[in-house]
Amino acid sequence: MATRRKRSETPSESLFDEQDLPAHPDGFIDEGPQDSPAQQAARKGATAVAQVVQQPMPSIALKPMNGAITRQMMLTWLKIVREIQQQPKADTYKIPMPVLMDFLGDKSNYERLKSTLRSLNAVQVEWNEVNSGGTQWTVSSLLSQAKIIRSPSQNIVEVSLPPDISRGVRELEQFSELNLIMARELKNQSALNLYRIAVAYETNPSKLTFRKPPEEWDMYLRVKPQGHGAAFEYKYFKRDTLLPAIEEVNRLTHLNLELIEHKEGRVVVEIQFRIEPKTVEVLPLLLGDAAKEAIKLAEAELRALGLKATEAISIVTTYGSERVMANVAYVKQRSAAVSESAALRNPTAYLKAAIKNNYADGMVFEEQTTSTQAPAKPNQAQVERDTKRARLELISHRRTEAQNLFLEMTRRESDNIWHEYLNQMDSFGNKTLASTARRKGLEAKIVQVHFYDWLAVRLWGEPDDQAISDFLQASSGAKA
C-alpha cells in the first residue's frame, strides 16, 4: 500500500516526534490526496474486494488516556473514517446502519453497535503534531457525537468528529492506505494495530518502523494506557503479545514482519520491525486462488507499462489479476481513444489510480465499428435514425471526456464545479436525483451520468448539428 508524497522544506505533522517520521532520503514527505471529496466519491470502486481507508499518519499509533480501544472499536472507527472520506465535507456525516453492521459481521446486534459508538465517544486519545511553527499537543475523543436514527424507510448512523480529528481525516496532509477487508481478518487486537503501523512504513526506503521501548509498543499494540496492571516484563510481552501478533500479520496479510531487538548488554531497550511485501508465489488470501499464470501475466502487463516489479507484485496481490487486467485494458483503450490535447499527463499514476478505484467497472470506452460495405442511399427515416444515433454517440463521448477532465482537475477546481452543480439541483426538477446527489454524491451511478452530461454541456454547449457533423468527421478521420 503506497503513500502519496510531496516535496517539502518543513517538517510534517505526525503522532510521533519529527525524527520518528517515515523519512525519505530524496527530501519528500508523505502527502494526502489532492482529490476533492467529489473526485474521491467518483473514483470509489463498487467492489468489496478492496475497501481502502486512508489513515491519517497521526492516528496510526493512538495513545489512549482512559480505557482501552478494543478491536471492535478500532474496526468501527476505521470503517467510519472510510465512509466519511467518500462524502463531501460536512459538520455531520450520515452512514447507513447496515453498512457498519455488515462490515462488523454482526447484522442483528443493535445494542453492540450502540455500545461501540458510546465507547468511541468516551475514550480520550492524545497525539503530538510537528510543523514549521513548533509542536502541538492535543487530547480528544474519537467521536464528538454519534446518533442512530431509525425509521420505517431507513436506519442511519449520524456522526460528527472533533475539529482536529475532522481536519486530520479530511485534509490528509500525510496518510497511509489500509485494506479494511484484510484488516478485518485479523482477530488479534495487537495484530490489527501492528498491521496498521506496518502499512504506514511499507513504502519507506529503509523498510523499518520507528524504534521505541517495549513498554510503548505494548501501549500501541494493545491500545491501553501505560502504567495499568502488573509491572511490565519484556519476556511475557514478547511471548503473549509480540510473537502472536507477528505470526498473524505474516499469515493473513500481504506483509512479512521481522522483529528487531536493540540491546544494551542483555537488556532489550528498544524494538522495531523490518517490513517486506510477500513475493509473487504467495497468492492473495482474500481474493481467491487466482491461477499463477494469470498473476504472472498481470504483473508482466504492469511492468510493460512502466511500473517497478515490486509495485506490480504488490498491486496484483492486493487487487487480484482479474481487476488489474480489466483496468490495464481500460487505460490502453482510453489512451488510444482520446485526442492529443486530452492525453494523460502521468500515464503510470493514472494506471495505478484506475486499478485502485476500478475505473473499468462499467466505465470503458466502447469500440465503434464501421461497415465495410457502402450503404444504400438512406431514406429520410434512416437519416433521422442515424442522426439520433450520432447524437447519442457524441453525448456518450463528451460524457467520458468530461469525466476524465473532472478527475484530473485540481482539488479547488473540482470542488467549485461540484458545488455549482449542487446549487442548480432544484432547477433540474428531479427530487430523487437531488436527494441521491446530496446523500451519496458521485458514488451513485445515476448522479455520475447526470453530472458528467451536465458538465459536458457546461464545457462544450449543447450537441447541435454542427457539433455532430464535426464529431462524425473526426471519428471517420481517426478510423482511416
Image: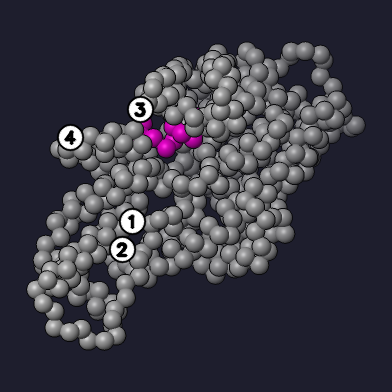
The reply to whether dot 1 and dot 3 touch (C-beta < 8 Å) is no
Q: Is residue 92 magenta?
A: no
In this rendering, the label closer to the viewer, 2 or 4: 4
Q: Mark 1 or mark 4, which has the lower sequence index?
A: 1
Q: Which residue is mark 3?
A: 90
Q: Which residue is mark 1?
A: 404
Above or below 22: residue 279: below
Q: Residue at x 73, y 47 (%)?
A: 256
Magenta-drawn segment: 80-90
Few, some or many C-alpha atoms within 10 Å of disc 2 (few <14, some 14-19, many ≥20)? few
Above or below 177: residue 326: below
Q: Residue at x 26, y 86 (%)?
A: 373
Q: Residue at x 58, y 21 (%)?
A: 109
Q: CA distance from mark 1 to mark 4?
A: 26 Å
Q: Mark 4 or mark 3, which has the lower sequence index?
A: 3
Above or below 290: residue 145: above
Q: Is residue 205 left or right of residue 324?
A: right
Q: State the image coordinates of residue 335 (x, y, percent, origin top left).
A: 38, 67
Of the residues shown, which amino acid type is indicated by label 1?
Asn
Q: State the image coordinates of residue 253 (x, y, percent, origin top left).
A: 68, 45
Q: CA distance from mark 2 to mark 3?
A: 33 Å
Q: Mark 2 or mark 1, which has the lower sequence index?
A: 2
Q: Which residue is mark 2?
A: 342
Q: Is residue 160 left or right of residue 282?
A: left
Quarter of the rendering containing residue 294: bottom right
Q: State the image coordinates of residue 130 (x, y, percent, origin top left).
A: 53, 29
Quarter of the rendering containing residue 87: top left
Q: Residue at x 11, y 77 (%)?
A: 379
Few, some or many C-alpha atoms within 10 Å of disc 4 (few <14, some 14-19, many ≥20)? few
